[in-house]
Image (cartoon, grey):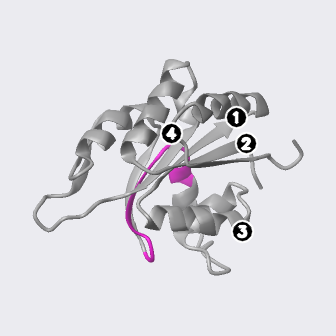
Amino acid sequence: MLMNNSVIVIYGTHAAAEEAVKELHKSGFDMKKLSIVGKVYHSEEQVIGYYNTGERVGYWGKSGAFWGAIWGFFFGSALLFVPGVGPILVGGPLVGALIGALQGAVITGGLSAIGAALYSLGIPKDSIVKYETSLKSDKFLLIVHGTIEEVKRAHEILEATQVEETASYKAQGS
């Protein structure tokens, strides 16, 4: 099931998640192996939107500076409304897993679309509840995919950031 090893890190603020992304980038980590998920903040007084113009991706809203600053690091992006969680932004390889889960109607066993995407990456069901709860609580998930060595290196880099919680998962057969 899990094609790559991964580490999932929970951050309590967009600033902490942004710092982590920048630290990985500074260290030369392959940013195509990085995914991020965060809830979209909504306000009736402010336009909220997401756009893509060629290679430029932008976001309007309360967290516009955060999302605008980090979109360039990620390969793939999506804005979705997930029942039970609300509107979320997703960047990186997790976008493909999420779309695959939605298109394949993989949402079984009580998993949300996010849960199904994480499960398709090999994340155990008992851990998925924790990640969905974190998203509902306006936290951010940073997911690093790669070889055992890459994930270990990313984990070491991320431990020096404002991490709330971290967990590593090994690919089957690793």
Query: Where does label 3 land, which residue?
Result: 126
| Kind of residue at badge 4 | Gln
Quarter of the image for the N terminus: give it. bottom right
The relative height of residue 174 versus residue 86 in the rendered view (above or below) is above
| Residue farthest along the left direction in this orientation | 45
| Kind of residue at badge 1 | Val
In the rendered structure, are the residues bearing label 3 and label 2 in contact, judged by CB atoms less than 8 Å apart?
no
In the rendered structure, are the residues bearing label 1 and label 4 in contact, judged by CB atoms less than 8 Å apart?
no
Query: Where does label 2 land, which residue?
Result: 4
Which residue occupies 66% across, 30% down?
156
Q: Locate residue 139, reporting x and y percent.
A: 45, 56
**Label 1 – label 4 distance at C-alpha:** 18 Å
**Label 3 – label 4 distance at C-alpha:** 24 Å
Labelled disc at residue 162: 4
**Label 2 – label 4 distance at C-alpha:** 25 Å
Q: Earlier in the sequence, mark 3 or mark 2?
A: 2
Q: Locate residue 109, reporting x and y percent.
A: 68, 80
Graded by Cα atoms within 10 Å as few (under 14), some (14 to 19) or many (20 or more), the crowding at tag 4 reads some
Quarter of the image for the C terminus: give it. top right
